[in-house]
Image (cartoon, rainbow, N blue to C red):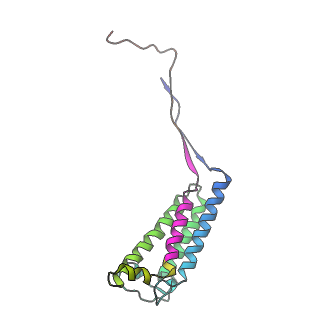
């Protein structure tokens, strides 16, 4: 038996797939960036809310954008944009997943801040946090519109010159 070589090719999936990926990524990034500057709590916008709010139940203020949850949302958006360079979309999916993780971390801390009351926590989280969630979902889905691998399965070819022995006959 002779085995053919194993081949892997990356298929782009056509122009529609690439345009869909581009649009989904751009829309998701826009949601992330806009959400970074909207209210996250009743007293703070994302660009003024300390990033420590993701790790401890203290929604303190911060004037340096780099140290805020809004700055983190913008950074995630930039990673998603850089992900457009790679045809497979794995970096874009990673950015979308990171946005979802940040949202969950913020939601847990909101739950803790608002006295372990789910309804109050949901109402206490403002539009910026919800746009982070929406943007993360859109970016994540956009990453799945990337190119995909087409794998050629090795095939077994019977060699006409090889005779099978009949062991046990």
Task: Please give left or right for residue 13 compared with residue 133 in the image.
Answer: right
Q: Residue furthest top?
A: 169
The foreground one among 98 and 38 is 38
Query: Where's residue 167, x and y in %?
Result: 34, 12
Please say whether residue 145 is one of the residues in the magenta stretch.
yes
Q: Residue furthest front?
A: 119
**Figure check: 12 above or below 62:** above
Task: Please give left or right for residue 30 compared with residue 44 in the image.
Answer: right
Q: Residue at x 46, y 88 (%)?
A: 42
Boundaries of the magenta span: 130-151
Location of the C terminus (image quadrant): top left
The foreground one among 52 and 42 is 42
Query: Where's residue 110, x and y in %?
Result: 39, 81
Q: How many marks?
A: 0
**Figure check: 20 above or below 115:** above
Query: Where's residue 62, x and y in %?
Result: 46, 88
Tell me the quarter of the picture where residue 164 sits: top left
Q: Residue at x 51, y 74 (%)?
A: 132
Query: Where's residue 99, x and y in %?
Result: 48, 70
**Figure check: 80 above or below 1:** below
For the stretch drawn in magenta, the main secondary structure is: helix
Q: Residue at x 54, y 70 (%)?
A: 135
Please say whether residue 69 is one of the residues in the magenta stretch.
no
Q: Residue at x 51, y 36 (%)?
A: 153
């Amino acid at each position: 038996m002779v085995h053919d070589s194993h081949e892997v090719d990356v298929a782009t999936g056509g122009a529609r797939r690439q345009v869909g990926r581009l649009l989904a990524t751009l829309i998701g990034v826009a949601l992330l960036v806009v959400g970074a500057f909207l209210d996250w709590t009743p007293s703070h916008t994302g660009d003024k809310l300390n990033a420590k709010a993701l790790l401890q139940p203290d929604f303190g203020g911060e004037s340096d954008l780099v140290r805020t949850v809004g700055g983190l949302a913008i950074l995630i958006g930039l990673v998603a944009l850089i992900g457009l360079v790679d045809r497979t979309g794995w970096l874009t999916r990673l950015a979308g997943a990171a946005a979802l993780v940040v949202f969950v971390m913020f939601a847990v801390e909101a739950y803790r801040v608002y006295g372990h009351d789910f309804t109050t926590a949901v109402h206490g989280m403002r539009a910026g946090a919800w746009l982070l969630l929406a943007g993360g979902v859109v970016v994540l889905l956009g990453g799945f519109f990337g190119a995909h691998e087409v794998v050629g399965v090795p095939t077994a070819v019977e060699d006409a010159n090889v005779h099978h022995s009949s062991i046990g006959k």
